[in-house]
Amino acid sequence: MAGERLLRAVLSFYREEADDLARLEPLLSCRLSRGWSALRIDCSDRLHLEQINELVPLLRAPLDALQLVRQIRLMAPGVPDRIYPVRVPQLHDGQASTAE
């Protein structure tokens, strides 16, 4: 239930951005759940995980605004988990780090 609410919140965040909203469509076939500090996204397979992996930058802004999780954890059968921080550390010059 909490995962469904988070998904609705993310989609709502982009409700006026049709292109971004369309890009998020692969999330609809994931199972989302929230733990103590992470949003867990269960993907069906490696290919699906790769699609969702490309969406991590889009997920960060609404999840950071909600401040309900600190990490995004992508999971799929037979694939090592991928864990990303919701808030990307800032460099000294004020630009976001590109390392993921």
Image (cartoon, rainbow, N blue to C red):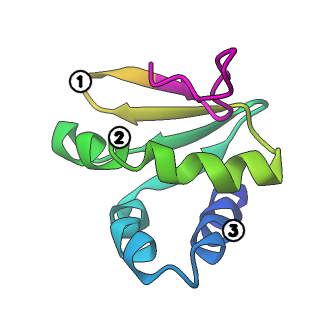
Q: Identify the residue under disc 2.
A: 53
Q: Secondary structure at mark 2?
A: helix
Residue visible at 82% across and 45% down?
67
Q: Is residue 100 visible?
A: no
Can you name the residue that lies furthest to the right here? 67
Residue visible at 29% across and 41% down?
49
Magenta span contains residue 5: no
Residue 35 in the image: x percent, y percent?
Answer: 72, 35
Q: Which quadrant is home to the N terminus?
A: bottom right
Residue 34 in the image: x percent, y percent?
Answer: 69, 43
Between disc 2 and disc 1, whose residue precedes?
2
Q: Are marks 1 and 3 in contact (CB under 8 Å)?
A: no
Specify the segment rendered in magenta.
83-100
Task: Inspect the image, locate mark 2, and give the three-letter code of the amino acid beneath it.
Answer: Asn
Mark 3 vs mark 2, CA separation in Å = 19 Å
Between disc 3 and disc 2, whose residue precedes?
3
Mark 2, residues whose alpha carbon is within 10 Å: few (<14), some, or many (≥20)?
A: some
Mark 1 vs mark 3, CA separation in Å = 29 Å
Q: Secondary structure at mark 1?
A: loop
Mark 2 vs mark 1, CA separation in Å = 16 Å
For this view, does 2 lie left or right of residue 98? right
Q: Are marks 2 and 1 in contact (CB under 8 Å)?
A: no
Judge depth for marks 2 and 1 and give the one in front.
Answer: 2
Mark 3, residues whose alpha carbon is within 10 Å: few (<14), some, or many (≥20)?
A: some
Residue 63 in the image: x percent, y percent?
Answer: 69, 49
Task: Inspect the image, locate mark 3, and give the three-letter code of the amino acid beneath it.
Answer: Ala
Q: Secondary structure at mark 3?
A: helix
**Relative to 18, is 66 above or below?**
above
For this view, does 19 lie left or right of residue 31? left
Q: Identify the residue under disc 1.
A: 78
Q: Is residue 35 visible?
A: yes
